[in-house]
Image (tube, rainbow, N blue to C red):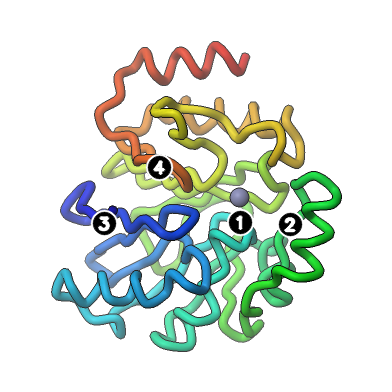
Amino acid sequence: MMSEILPNLHWIEGRASNIYLWIGEEGLALFDTGMSGDVDKILDYVTKIGRQTTNLTAILITHADMDHAGGAARIHARTGAPIYASKETAVYIKDGLSPPHLPKWVQFLMDRFFKYPPVPTTAVHQFTEEGSLPDLEDWQVLASPGHTMDHHSFYNPRFGILIAGDALNTRRDRLNCSEKRATADMASARESARRLLRLTPAVIACGHGTPFTDHSASDIMMLDRALA
Ligand SMILES: [Zn+2]
């Protein structure tokens, strides 16, 4: 699926995760990149909606998993857009490694055989743990560890948009916290999810599952209670 969620926010469904395109006054920004094999689809989409890929001014990464950061190196190479990532995420993406959060043998195979194209260190701008992003005035960075410990989410209070990454998902057509089998620290994941829910976002743009736009306050409250 590829569609407009809001006039300034588009959803691109990658092979294994969601990518979001922000059309801001300051230029275009991508939230996560999908896998390396998603790059053509993403850049074609930008052109299809009448924009230029050279107007991409930022690539933001929620966490260093292959399905979220795997396309970063190729998108950077084709557009020149800088990559924004946390200090911890920057360490993994320069080697094409996913942060530890999977069952041991899966993690071993990932680290050994499923590396993604490494991101050149010079392309990465580190953002601070919390706070605003230098070139994206409407957006705030929120540390949301748990699924992986390098995980960050992005929030736009002006439009009520939450880019949740894997801190929340809408698998099985409902709002969920990161599932136990793919979570580094479950207590942190629950705490992060509740913190994000407390923002009562109008749009919950998750890394997996259809973005939530027509949810009610009780959907949010139900998950918050379940996580308490
Ligand atoms: Zn993930």
Q: Label 2 to label 3, Cα distance in Å?
A: 28 Å
How packed mark 3 is, by other alpha carbons closer than 10 Å (few <14, some 14-19, many 20 or more), is: some
Q: In which quarter of the image is residue 193?
A: top right
Front residue (pair 190, 156): 190
User: Which secondary structure, mark 4?
Assistant: strand
Compared with 18, 160 (above or below) is above
Q: Locate the C terminus by quadrant.
A: top right
Q: Name the residue under label 2.
A: 99
How packed mark 1 is, by other alpha carbons closer than 10 Å (few <14, some 14-19, many 20 or more), is: many
Determine whether label 3 and label 1 are within 8 Å by CB.
no
User: In front: mark 4 or mark 2?
Assistant: 2
User: Which secondary structure, mark 2?
Assistant: loop
Q: Label 2 to label 1, Cα distance in Å?
A: 8 Å
User: Which secondary structure, mark 1?
Assistant: loop
Q: Mark 1 points at which residue?
A: 63
- Residue 154 % position (x, y): 46, 49
Q: Mark 3 points at which residue?
A: 2
Decide which of tag 4 and tag 3 comes sooner along the chain: 3
Q: Quadrant of residue 144?
A: top right
Compared with 77, 27 (above or below) is above
Q: What residue type is labelled 4?
A: Leu
Compared with 197, 19 (above or below) is below
Within 8 Å of ligand 1, the CB of disc 1?
yes
Q: Mark 4 points at which residue?
A: 162
User: In front: mark 4 or mark 1?
Assistant: 1
Decide which of tag 2 and tag 1 comes sooner along the chain: 1
